[in-house]
Amino acid sequence: MSFYLHQFTYQLGFWFTWLLIPIVVEIFPAIYFNLVLIKTSKKHQVMQEPLKLPMVSIVLPIYNSGQTLYQCIQSISQSTYPKELIQIIAVNNQSTDNSFTVFNQAQADFPVLRMQWMNTDQGKARALNAAIYNSMGQYIINLDTDGWLEPNALKRFVLYFENHSEIDAATGTILTQKKMIQKTQSKWLKLLQLNEYFEYAQSFLSGRSIENRGNRLFTMSGAFSAFRRDVLVQTFMYNVDTVGEDTDMTFQLRFRLGKRIGFCDDAMFYVEPISGYSELYLQRQRWQRGQIEVAQNFMQNKLSVRQIFTNFMISRLMIDHTFIFPRLVWITGLAMLLFFGYSPVVVSMSVVMMYVLYVAYGLMNYTSSYMLLKTFPTERAYFKNKWWIAFTMPLYNGINTLIRFIGIINTMTRNAAWQTKTFKSETRDIKNILMADWSQLWKDKK
């Protein structure tokens, strides 16, 4: 009996060691935050509408947006916000397609809208900066042109600011377009898009709701964010030397000006789902590089591990960056233990238990996101039937972790001007290096 008890204790300690990171970093916080969201979601603040609504300026940075620009402008036209109080600034940064023709057609079809076309140098940050100086609205709202607005989004955003005088900038909720996902023919691509949809719902509805409670919003999404104009012009504008210009602006507002960043969960913007694994590979590396660049520019020599429980930036950077390496070691190291005589059953059980924990983590975030979709019955009905995606999310998140780790390496080993290579391109480079090394070894043997 003592032998079996010893074996059980030994294996339990083994499993707990391998499960320590997901338990401490993700599972425990998820349980706590879900309880908080369940409690707070029952309270709904009624927004008071001012006697006179303010003008808003909507900035559309354009780069080869011919296929999506019309739908984006159409969604603004169908908004419940008064058309005479909307200024649209379409800022073209060196497009080579028919974006201007599409803009002209939209201008003709929606004559009530006040629309303006501008040409700028290449780069999204330059386009945004040029538009800010030409804006007239009390509030400036940035929209990516590959998406469309929910009809009440503009009004909800404005009322959010009008009822929260302490908020100077905010981001809204972004989800991928479910109709486009439904039209996808490839089963593997549809599965990827569904996981991305699930990820966006978790990240915005659940994640940013929690971050917003403690004024801990790390970044405002460049695809859908809003600002008080008088505060935005106090910044150094968007940084043209980083791929994370939206994160840089968030840091400017919080750390340089001491402003409050908010989250308007019921202002919804729908973007196109991802086109494939190649786009995912490029996108996540770009996001990772942007976070690293901005954190280094603003927080270098200001952070200490001793502040991990008092400074949210420490814990966020530790989870998003520092823990990536041990996560990968934990996962790949499990397989290597077989070569050191560990039982395949013990190793397999560890993998299964880790998977179960991450599924539980996904289901908890699913529950939170579902609760926060109560003002969107159609979206909620669609999301309700996608609970099963929690069982594929661990693999999806694992792939993203690996891509982000590659992004960290590329950021460290290449200069600031590096262009992200596609997965096929980097795979080809690795193959060529391995072949060259093998050839050299073969020559040395001879």
Image: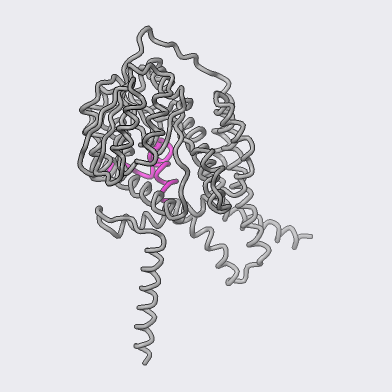
| Farthest-out residue, top | 51
Is 117 above or below relative to 303? above
**In the rendering, at what x and y percent does residue 283 appear?**
39, 49
**In the rendering, at what x and y percent does residue 54 appear?**
33, 15
User: Image check: 425 left or right of 184?
Assistant: left
- Where, by quadrant of the figure, is residue 102 drawn? top left
Residue at 79% in and 60% down:
1
* Predominant SS of the magenta segment: helix
Residue 11, magenta (yes or no):
no
**In the rendering, at what x and y percent does residue 25 appear?**
51, 44
Residue 321, magenta (yes or no):
yes
In this view of the protein, which residue sits in the foreground, 288 or 154? 154
| Callout count | 0
User: Image check: 168 left or right of 328?
Assistant: left
Quadrant of the snapshot with the C terminus: bottom left
Residues shaded magenta? 301-322
In this view of the protein, which residue sits in the foreground, 373 or 247? 373
Is 196 above or below relative to 54? below
Residue 375 visible, this orientation = yes
Colour scheme in the image?
one colour
**In the rendering, at what x and y percent does residue 95 appear?**
27, 44
